[in-house]
Image (cartoon, rainbow, N blue to C red):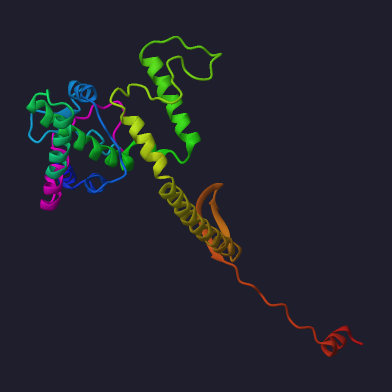
C-alpha cells in the first residue's frame, strides 16, 4: 500500500514547477546572463544532467515534510518539467533556445557548436529554475530583509563549521562571510534568487496580510468557542464517584437552577401567629 501511495505521489505534477515554467517562458523582466563557468560547475556537481536530451536540472527540491534529516533520500531522475510540459510550452521553450543560441553565436563565433547549443539550453533552463525556486526556494521563508540577513548569517556559519574554520566570538559575522554574498554560490543562483525575492515584495506583503487576516478569523473563532465552553462549564457540575477511597467514575451533571419561592406577606403573618 505504501509503495502504491509513493508511486502516485511521484506521478503527480509539481504545480510550483509548472508555474515557474509558465512564468519563465513568458518573462520579460529577468536579465539573467549565465557564464560557461557556472554551467561547468553545475555539470560537475551533477545538478545539470547533460546525458539526456534535452538536458535538464535535477529537481532536488522534493517534499521533505516527513523525512528525517538522518535519512538519505534518492535523488529523482525524472527530466523535471518535461514529463508534464504542454505542446505550446514545448514550442515556446525551443523558440527561446534558438534565440539564445543565435545570441551566443553572434557574440562568440569561435565557440564549438555543440557547446553553444548546450549553453543555450542551460541559460533557458537556469531561468526556468530561478522562477521555480522563487516559489520553492529557501528565501520563501523570509518575510523581510532582516529574515534574509539572518538566513545568510546562518548559512555562512554552517559553511565555517563545514570547512573547520575557527570560531571568533568577537565577530558578529562568521569568518568566511561576505555581507552581500552567499556561501557556495559559484553559479550565482542565490544572487539571482535574492533579486527575484526583492522584486516580489508586493506579492510577499500581500501574502503576509492574507495570513494575518486568516489568523484574525481563527482567533475570533477560538474566542467564541472558549466562551461557549465556559458557559457549558457554568451550566454543569462535575461529580466524582468514589468507592472505598478509589475514584471510580467522573460525570458531568446538568445544573438545575431552582427558582426562589415568592414570599406572600399575608401567609407570613399567619405562620407567625400574628
Q: Residue 80: x percent and y percent?
A: 16, 39
In the picture, residue 43 is in which quadrant?
A: top left
Q: Residue at horizontal 26%, vertical 48%?
A: 23
41 in relation to 210, above or below = above
Residue 262 left/right relative to 35 = right
132 in relation to 36, above or below = below
114 in relation to 177, above or below = below
Question: In this view of the protein, can residue 63 be seen by the observer?
Answer: yes
Instruction: Return the residue found at the far right.
Output: 274
Q: Residue 154: x percent and y percent?
A: 44, 25
Which is nearer the eye, 85 or 248? 85
Q: Residue at horizontal 45%, vertical 54%?
A: 210
Question: In this view of the protein, can residue 57 be seen by the observer?
Answer: no
47 in relation to 209, above or below = above
Instruction: Return the residue found at the far bottom.
Output: 266
Which is nearer the eye, 182 or 252? 182
In the picture, residue 79 is in which quadrant?
A: top left
Q: Residue 68: x percent and y percent?
A: 30, 31
Magenta residue check for 25 = no
Q: Residue 143: x percent and y percent?
A: 46, 41
| Residue bounds of the magenta highlight | 65-93
Which image quarter holds the C terminus? bottom right
Q: How many marks?
A: 0
Residue 158 left/right relative to 13 = right
Which image quarter holds the N terminus? top left
Magenta residue check for 68 = yes
Q: Residue at horizontal 28%, vertical 38%?
A: 130
Which is nearer the eye, 241 or 262? 262
Could you tell me what secondary structure mostly forms the magenta stretch?
Answer: loop
Amino acid at each position: 500500500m505504501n509503495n502504491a501511495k509513493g508511486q502516485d505521489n511521484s506521478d503527480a505534477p509539481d504545480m510550483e514547477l509548472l508555474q515557474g515554467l509558465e512564468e519563465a517562458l513568458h518573462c520579460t523582466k529577468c536579465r539573467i546572463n549565465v557564464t560557461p563557468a557556472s554551467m561547468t560547475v553545475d555539470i560537475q556537481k551533477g545538478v545539470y544532467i547533460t546525458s539526456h536530451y534535452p538536458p535538464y536540472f535535477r529537481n532536488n527540491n522534493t517534499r521533505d515534510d516527513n523525512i528525517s534529516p538522518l535519512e538519505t533520500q534518492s535523488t529523482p531522475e525524472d527530466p523535471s518539467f518535461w514529463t508534464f510540459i504542454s505542446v505550446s510550452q514545448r514550442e515556446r521553450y525551443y523558440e527561446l533556445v534558438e534565440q539564445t543560441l543565435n545570441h551566443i553565436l553572434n557574440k562568440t563565433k569561435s565557440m564549438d557548436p555543440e557547446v553553444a547549443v548546450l549553453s543555450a539550453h542551460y541559460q533557458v533552463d537556469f531561468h526556468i529554475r530561478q522562477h521555480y525556486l522563487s516559489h520553492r526556494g529557501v528565501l520563501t521563508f523570509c518575510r523581510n530583509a532582516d529574515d534574509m540577513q539572518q538566513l545568510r548569517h546562518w548559512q555562512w556559519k554552517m559553511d565555517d563549521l563545514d570547512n573547520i574554520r575557527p570560531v571568533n566570538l568577537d565577530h558578529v559575522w562568521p569568518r568566511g562571510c561576505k555581507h552581500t554574498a552567499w556561501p557556495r554560490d559559484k553559479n550565482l543562483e542565490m544572487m539571482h534568487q535574492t533579486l527575484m525575492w526583492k522584486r516580489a515584495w508586493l506579492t510577499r506583503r500581500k501574502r503576509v496580510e492574507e495570513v494575518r487576516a486568516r489568523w484574525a478569523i481563527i482567533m475570533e473563532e477560538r474566542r467564541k468557542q472558549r466562551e461557549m465552553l465556559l458557559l457549558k462549564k457554568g451550566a454543569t457540575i462535575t461529580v466524582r464517584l468514589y468507592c472505598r477511597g478509589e475514584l471510580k467514575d467522573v460525570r458531568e451533571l446538568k445544573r438545575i437552577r431552582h427558582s426562589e419561592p415568592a414570599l406572600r406577606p399575608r401567609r407570613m403573618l399567619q405562620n407567625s401567629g400574628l
